[in-house]
Amino acid sequence: MTQVVWQSSVVLIGKDAQELFEAGVFIFFAQPVPDALAEVSLIHTGPDAEFQPIEAGDELWIGDSRVVIEEVGSMANDNFRQLGHIVIYLNVGDQELLPGAVKASGDIPVPAVGDTLTIHRTTEA
């Protein structure tokens, strides 16, 4: 059985974020976002429920596509809870993980304004 542990929706995509998406880097920020960071970010509404820390094995869904979270940096959940900020690196293998980042594997299309963002966790029935 799976449960949604975090949900939000895309409200804006920065003008320079597309290049990062193509390189497998997704920078999330909840509103409000400083202008300089907004240019490279996927900006979302923030969670609609109490924050639950993300874990390796969770799935990040953007619309109908998903990636599997492999590793969570030591500061990632604090940043995500406080600012709605997290950096997702897709398919980077053994690359060293920055403290505020998350490694994930899989492929997702370029996000669009209005897409739903969710993190799902498999739980025992």
Image (cartoon, rainbow, N blue to C red):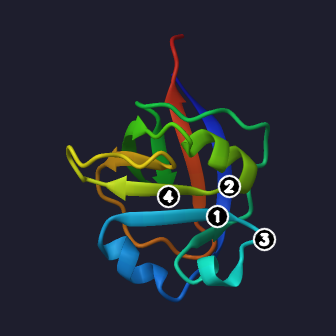
The secondary structure type at the circle numbered 3 is loop
Which residue is denoted by mark 3 in the rendering?
Answer: 32
Give the CA distance from mark 3 to mark 1.
Answer: 8 Å
Which residue is denoted by mark 2 in the rendering?
Answer: 84
- Residue type pointed to by label 2: Gly
- Residue type pointed to by label 1: Phe
Give the CA distance from mark 1 to mark 2.
Answer: 5 Å
In contact (CB < 8 Å): disc 4 and disc 3:
no
Give the CA distance from mark 3 to mark 2.
Answer: 10 Å
Q: Of marks 2 and 4, which one's residue comes earlier in the chain? A: 4
Percent across and percent down for residue 58 are: 46, 34
Mark 3 residue crowding within 10 angstroms, few (<14) / some (14–19) / many (20+): few
Q: Of marks 4 and 1, which one's residue comes earlier in the chain? A: 1
At 71% from the left and 77% from the top, the residue drawn is 34
Q: Nearer the viewer, mark 2 or mark 4?
A: 2
Which residue is denoted by mark 4 in the rendering?
Answer: 62
Mark 1 residue crowding within 10 angstroms, few (<14) / some (14–19) / many (20+): many
Instruction: Identify the residue at the far left of this view.
Output: 93
In contact (CB < 8 Å): disc 1 and disc 2:
yes
- Residue 68 occupies which quadrant of the picture? top left
The secondary structure type at the circle numbered 2 is loop
Q: Which mark is residue 29?
A: 1
Image: 113 above or below 70? below
